[in-house]
Image: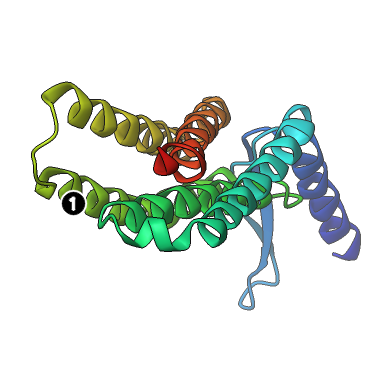
Amino acid sequence: MRLLRLGCFAIYRKLLETRYIAFAEKCKHDSSGGKVLPSRVEVRVINLAPWHDVLIAASAAAATLAGLILAAMSVNIDSILKYPSLPPRAGSAIGSLVYVLVLTVTGLIPGVTSDALAWVTLLALLAPLAIHVDVMVRQFQIRPRQTFTRIWTKVALAIGQVAPFVVSGVLFLQGSGWGLDWMIVGALAVFVGSVVNAWVLLVEIRR
C-alpha cells in the first residue's frame, strides 16, 4: 500500500514537472474492501518555462509604466483636474497596467494550472474593463463634441487593450497554450495605450 501511494505521488509529480496536459491517478482507499481504487483527475498544466523571461520583462514594464503615469499625474495634477476626461483616462492606464502586472506574476507561480490562469485573466479583467467603459462614456459627453475619427480611435484603442485578454482567458479554459500568446499580445497593447496616455498627461496637456 505504501509503495503504491509513493508510486502514484511520483507519477503525479512527474506530470507537473513536464507541464503537459495529462491525467493523474489519485489513489483512494475503499474502507469496505480495503482496495485501492484509481480515480482519474484531469490536471491541465501549461508549459510556462519558455515564457519565464517574457513574463518577467512584461511585469517589470507594467510596473515601470504605472510609476511613470503616477509621476506625470503628480507633476501636472492641477492641469489634469481641469479636464473631466483626463483623471479617468489616467486611471484606466494605471488599472490596465496593474492588471497586466497581476496576470504576469500569476503566470510565474510554479505549477499554476491553465484553469487558474483562466479565472484570474477573466475575473480580474472586470476592473479595467469597467474603467475603460467609464472613460468612453466621458469621451462621448465632451462638449464641444470631438470628431468621429478622434472618438473612435480612442474606442478602438480601448477595445484593443481588452479583447486579447478575453481570447486568452477562453483559451486557458480550454487548456490551450495559445492563451499565453494572446496574453502577451494584450500586454503589448496595454503598453502602447499607456505610453499614449503618458504622452498626453506629460506633454499634450501643456500645449
* Residue shown at the point (68%, 32%) measured from the top left: 20
**Which of 9/116 is in front?**
116
* Residue shown at the point (67%, 51%) measured from the top left: 105
Q: Quadrant of residue 61?
A: top right
- Is residue 39 visible in the rendered image? The answer is no
* Residue shown at the point (62%, 34%) measured from the top left: 21
Query: Which corner quadrant holds the C terminus?
Result: top left
Q: Quadrant of residue 107?
A: top right
Query: Which corner quadrant holds the N terminus?
Result: bottom right
Q: Residue furthest front?
A: 207
Residue placed under numbered mark 1 in the picture: 138
* Residue shown at the point (89%, 65%) measured from the top left: 2
Q: Position of residue 206 (x, y in %)?
A: 44, 43
Q: Position of residue 43 (x, y in %)?
A: 61, 46
**Which of 29/117 is in front?**
117
Left or right for 7, reference 67? right
**Which of 167/83 is in front?**
83
Instruction: Give the total number of marks visible in the rendering.
Output: 1
Q: Secondary structure at mark 1?
A: helix
Left or right for 113, reference 171? right
Q: Position of residue 50 (x, y in %)?
A: 76, 27
Location of residue 120 with respect to 174 vertically, above or below: below
Q: Residue furthest bottom?
A: 31
Q: Give the amino acid type for the residue marked by disc 1 in the picture.
A: Arg
Q: Position of residue 76 (x, y in %)?
A: 49, 56
Scheme of image coloration? rainbow
Location of residue 178 with respect to 35 vertically, above or below: above
- Is residue 50 visible in the rendered image? The answer is yes
